[in-house]
């Protein structure tokens, strides 16, 4: 229980750090008054405006006011679309979540069989091939992988759409782009973790009592090798998220990252703020879930 | 921050000038040169690729067949191996949408990638090593506070940091290096800290302290050399990912800005004409793939040689 509490506290602490970053964004980009008011506004009107917005208050007080508004979901109005920033970005969140889930699924679909094969055929050709594929995945630039996939599956073979999200199969190519790097890392981790586990005495015992290799590897090996994978997925989520941003931009996929990239070019601060906060919160939650799953899988963590 | 208690209180001029009569573990960096003797085939090949890449980056302008920025709209989107009939010029890898020579831009882009990879890793190593050494050595509230900051930092994805920096400072080459450096330093901080912790009460540190060496001297002359193998290994593994990050950031328009060619913004240049001219983005992406693969193979190999304990993921 104290472990769960400790992880929760850590998550809150991280969120606090992210809120400072978000608050800092408004400040470091210049005085909002000079951005929002016309150039030739008389000084007394500027001062009045600053007073109205609370910009003449000390910065810690301004931060508290910011948090107060944030807790009520008030992040201001998008400069561009003239609607409230929070619902605007949040409405795109499910699309991004779906894409990330698909990317994780893709990573697992590649990594689990590949990692298994590599470990079972340690230092033989299938292992070498699996390691080479993993190396490719860790060395390929995400936007370029996307371009090659478009060339292959959209332009040449015409199997899959190259942009948008209007068909169910539209998610396939973006998910591959978002998940490839994680798939490669997972493959390597699963392979080495499985090799470690397979060196244990209980595996030798399982072999010795005559269990078929399939049962030894899947029941005794894989089950224990999965534990570090959970932690890895938690840490990997930041990279996966980064590649989701690339995938959404390349495939014109209507998630919240694409909205944010557009907002940067127009310097639409409220939208950028909400995006940074939501993305940060998302990563905190995923890491928390990974920590909890880790403790659930491995009683040694929970009881330590 | 608290100065660790001296087991023996020495003071005066003798103590200030005191040096250990031997150098502590000068081996770490020498070892990385020694190991070059037993390169295996894939590591040898990778070393060749990296050397070629560094060479191209170093003497770039001498190798470039044309000015990488020269536009010629009459030569738009010419395919690889194209020879211009009027001037007799060869375009080995074709031209992009503005009629610029892709081979020349690729060579110019190598400088940007190398600068970003090495610059980012250097900045991260500098920040991370400073924090790691000091927290591991001094401990106490300073260590606790810095480690909480490291925790928070680790949860902020580099893309978000890049967006913040791009918005605040504007996107540019130095800012890309800044983003990559400040988003990866925590990895150095963690590794260096944990290694420093094991050195803190080691014989070498105690011996140095007994003869009166100050904290700065102990950290720089006696602890740093012992953790340097880890720093070398971590850097070799990070340079590759830095090059990939640059590609992603430049692709999003948050990185290196045109007309400066970077492999990332060259891939972006090829997205629009993808249906008619595959070569515009395929070649820079292949260059990234080749170089990062080579760096990763070398990094893994170096890790196995220098630091068997880190043989993990």
Image: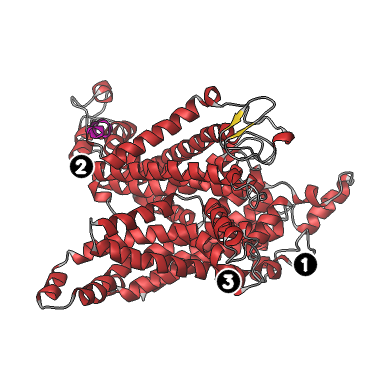
The circle on residue A83 is 1
Instruction: Name the chain under label 3.
Output: A
Secondary structure under tag 3 reads helix
In this rendering, the answer to whether A82 lies above or below B238 is below
Would residue B134 be seen by someone viewing this image from the given angle? Answer: no
Q: Are marks 1 and 3 on the same chain?
A: yes
Read off the residue under disc 2. Answer: B202
In the rendered image, residue A126, in percent from the top left (x then y), is placed at 28, 59
- Specify the quadrant that holds the N terminus of chain B: top left
Mark 1 or 2, closer to the camera: 1
Q: Quadrant of residue B260?
A: top right
Protein chain holding label 1: A
B32 drawn magenta: yes
Q: Residue at x 28, y 68 (%)?
A: A225
Residue designated by label 3: A169
Q: In the rendered view, does B299 fall on the left or right side of A289? A: left
> Which mark is first along the chain, 3 or 1?
1
Could you tell me which secondary element the residue under label 2 belongs to? loop
Residue A10 makes an appearance in the image = yes
Badge 3 crowding class, 10 Å Cα cut-off, few under 14, some 14 to 19, many 20 or more, is few
Q: Which stretch did the figure color magenta?
A: B29-37
Q: Is B279 colored magenta in this rendering?
A: no
Taking depth in this image into account, of B156 and B21 the one nearest to the observer is B156
Q: Nearer the viewer, mark 1 or mark 3?
A: 3
Circle 2 crowding by C-alpha within 10 Å: few under 14, some 14–19, many from 20: few
Secondary structure of the magenta portion, mostly?
A: helix
Give the spatial CA distance, label 1 vs label 3. Answer: 31 Å
Image spot of residue B249 (x, y percent): 58, 48
Which sits in the foreground, B308 or A41? B308
Measure the C-alpha gap from mark 1 to mark 2.
Answer: 62 Å
Check disc 1 and report its element: helix, strand or loop. Answer: loop
Query: Please, which chain is the residue tagged with disc 2 on?
Result: B
């Amino acid at each position: 229980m104290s472990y769960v509490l400790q992880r929760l506290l850590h998550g809150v602490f991280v969120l606090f750090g992210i809120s400072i970053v978000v608050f800092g964004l408004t400040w470091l980009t210049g005085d909002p008054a000079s951005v929002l008011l016309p150039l030739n506004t008389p000084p007394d009107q500027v001062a009045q405006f600053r007073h109205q917005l609370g910009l003449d208050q000390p910065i810690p007080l301004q931060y508290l006011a910011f948090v107060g508004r944030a807790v009520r979901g008030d992040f201001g109005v998008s400069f561009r679309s003239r609607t409230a920033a929070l619902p605007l970005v949040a409405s795109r969140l499910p699309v991004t979540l779906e894409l990330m889930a698909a990317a994780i699924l893709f990573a697992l679909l590649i990594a689990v069989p590949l990692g298994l094969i590599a470990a079972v055929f340690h230092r033989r050709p299938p292992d070498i091939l699996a390691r080479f594929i993993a190396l490719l995945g860790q060395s390929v630039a995400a936007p370029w992988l996307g371009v090659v996939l478009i060339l292959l599956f959209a332009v040449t073979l015409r199997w899959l759409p190259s942009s948008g999200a209007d068909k169910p199969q539209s998610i396939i190519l973006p998910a591959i782009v978002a998940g490839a790097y994680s798939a490669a890392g997972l493959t390597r981790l699963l392979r080495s973790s499985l090799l470690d586990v397979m060196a244990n005495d209980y595996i030798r015992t399982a072999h010795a009592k005559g269990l078929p290799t399939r049962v030894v590897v899947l029941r005794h090996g894989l089950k224990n090798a999965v534990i570090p994978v959970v932690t890895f997925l938690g840490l990997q989520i930041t990279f996966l998220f980064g590649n989701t941003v690339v995938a959404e931009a390349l495939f014109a996929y209507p998630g919240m990252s694409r909205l944010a990239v557009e907002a940067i070019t127009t310097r639409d601060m409220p939208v950028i703020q909400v995006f940074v906060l939501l993305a940060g919160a998302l990563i905190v939650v995923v890491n928390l879930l990974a920590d909890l799953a880790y403790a659930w899988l491995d009683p040694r963590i929970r009881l330590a | 921050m608290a100065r660790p208690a001296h087991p023996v209180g020495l003071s005066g001029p003798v103590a200030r000038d005191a040096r250990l009569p031997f150098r502590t573990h000068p081996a770490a960096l020498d070892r990385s040169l020694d190991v070059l003797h037993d390169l295996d085939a894939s590591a040898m090949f990778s070393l060749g690729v990296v050397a070629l890449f560094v060479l191209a980056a170093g003497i770039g302008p001498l190798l470039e067949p044309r000015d990488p920025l020269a536009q010629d709209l009459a030569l738009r989107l010419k395919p690889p191996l194209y020879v211009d009939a009027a001037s007799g010029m060869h375009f080995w890898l074709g031209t992009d949408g503005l009629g610029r020579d892709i081979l020349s831009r690729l060579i110019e882009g190598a400088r940007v990638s190398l600068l970003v990879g090495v610059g980012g890793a250097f900045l991260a190593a500098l920040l991370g090593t400073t924090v790691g050494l000091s927290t591991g050595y001094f401990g106490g509230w300073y260590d606790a506070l810095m480690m909480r900051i490291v925790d928070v930092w680790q949860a902020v994805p580099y893309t978000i940091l890049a967006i913040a920096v791009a918005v605040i400072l504007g996107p540019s080459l130095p800012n890309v290096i800044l983003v990559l450096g400040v988003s990866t330093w925590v990895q150095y901080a963690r590794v260096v800290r944990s290694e420093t912790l094991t050195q803190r009460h080691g014989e070498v540190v105690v011996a140095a302290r007994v003869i009166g060496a100050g904290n700065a001297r102990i950290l720089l002359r006696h602890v740093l050399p012992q953790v340097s193998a880890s720093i070398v290994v971590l850097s070799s593994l990070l340079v590759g990912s830095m090059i990939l990050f640059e590609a992603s950031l430049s692709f999003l328009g948050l990185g290196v800005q045109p007309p400066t060619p970077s492999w990332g913004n060259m891939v972006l240049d090829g997205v629009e004409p993808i249906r008619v001219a595959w070569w515009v983005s395929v070649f820079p992406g292949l260059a990234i793939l080749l170089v990062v693969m080579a760096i990763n193979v070398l990094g893994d190999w170096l890790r196995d040689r220098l630091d068997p304990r880190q043989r993990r993921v």
